[in-house]
């Protein structure tokens, strides 16, 4: 992730939404994406094997029911990438394979991951993306990019500020 580009995008063309507010990511079929919730799964330095000084964050995403499309309807997914921002920095999501090899099933629980490709198919979709964020981070927001489904070119970024609570 190019931080300078993301800063420019975040200031110049980002649309700002709230947790629970649906955003239309694709107009032809009416696909929406909602950041439903965000939670801290592990506080910094409480789980052996996770990066030092980092909290593990889970962001739940949901999309509406769309029945008239299939994976061949688009050349490219309408959602391109997921990021977390904090204090002027940006990070990409943590792949769940990193948790699979570490034996962190209890930490992740039944939270199924979701990817941009899930938004290419019919039906409603829900799942989680995971991030490591420094324990002292403030001004945390979830960002995702909206892409043209023909060219794949990024059209805009959407920002959703997050309020994080520790899970019990």
Image: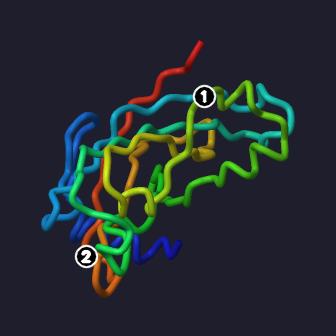
Q: Residue at x 79, y 29 (%)?
A: 47
Q: Quadrant of the C terminus?
A: top right
The percent position of residue 40, horizontal first and vertical second, equals 56, 29
Q: In the rendered view, would you say 136 is above or below 165?
A: below
Residue 21 percent location from the top left of the image: 20, 39
Q: CA distance from mark 1 to mark 2?
A: 33 Å
Q: Which residue is mark 2?
A: 155
Q: Residue furthest top?
A: 168
Q: Is residue 157 left or right of residue 86?
A: left
Would you identify the image quadrant in which residue 70 lies?
bottom left
Residue at the disc numbered 1? 110
Q: Residue at x 73, y 52 (%)?
A: 97
Helix, strand or loop at label 1? It is loop
Q: Horizontally, is 153 left or right of 47 in the view?
A: left
Task: Tell me where residue 20 appears, x and y as whole percent.
Answer: 25, 34
Q: Residue furthest bottom?
A: 151
The residue that appears at 32% across and 48% down in the rendered structure is 123
Answer with mark 1 or mark 2, whichever residue precedes in sequence.
1
Nearer the camera: disc 1 or disc 2: 1
């Amino acid at each position: 992730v190019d931080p300078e580009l993301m800063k420019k995008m975040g200031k110049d063309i980002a649309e700002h939404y709230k947790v629970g507010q649906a955003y239309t990511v694709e107009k032809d079929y009416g696909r929406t994406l909602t950041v439903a919730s965000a939670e801290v799964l592990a506080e910094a330095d409480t789980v052996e094997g996770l990066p030092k000084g980092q909290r593990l964050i889970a962001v739940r995403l949901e999309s509406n029911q769309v029945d008239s499309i299939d994976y061949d309807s688009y050349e490219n997914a309408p959602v391109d990438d997921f990021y977390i921002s904090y204090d002027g920095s940006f990070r990409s999501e943590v792949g769940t394979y990193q948790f699979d090899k570490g034996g962190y099933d209890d930490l992740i629980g039944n939270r199924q991951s979701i990817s941009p490709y899930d938004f290419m198919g019919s039906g409603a979709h829900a799942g989680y993306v995971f991030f490591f964020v420094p324990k002292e981070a403030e001004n945390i927001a979830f960002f995702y990019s909206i892409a043209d489904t023909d060219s794949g070119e990024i059209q805009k970024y959407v920002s959703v500020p997050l309020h994080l609570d520790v899970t019990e």
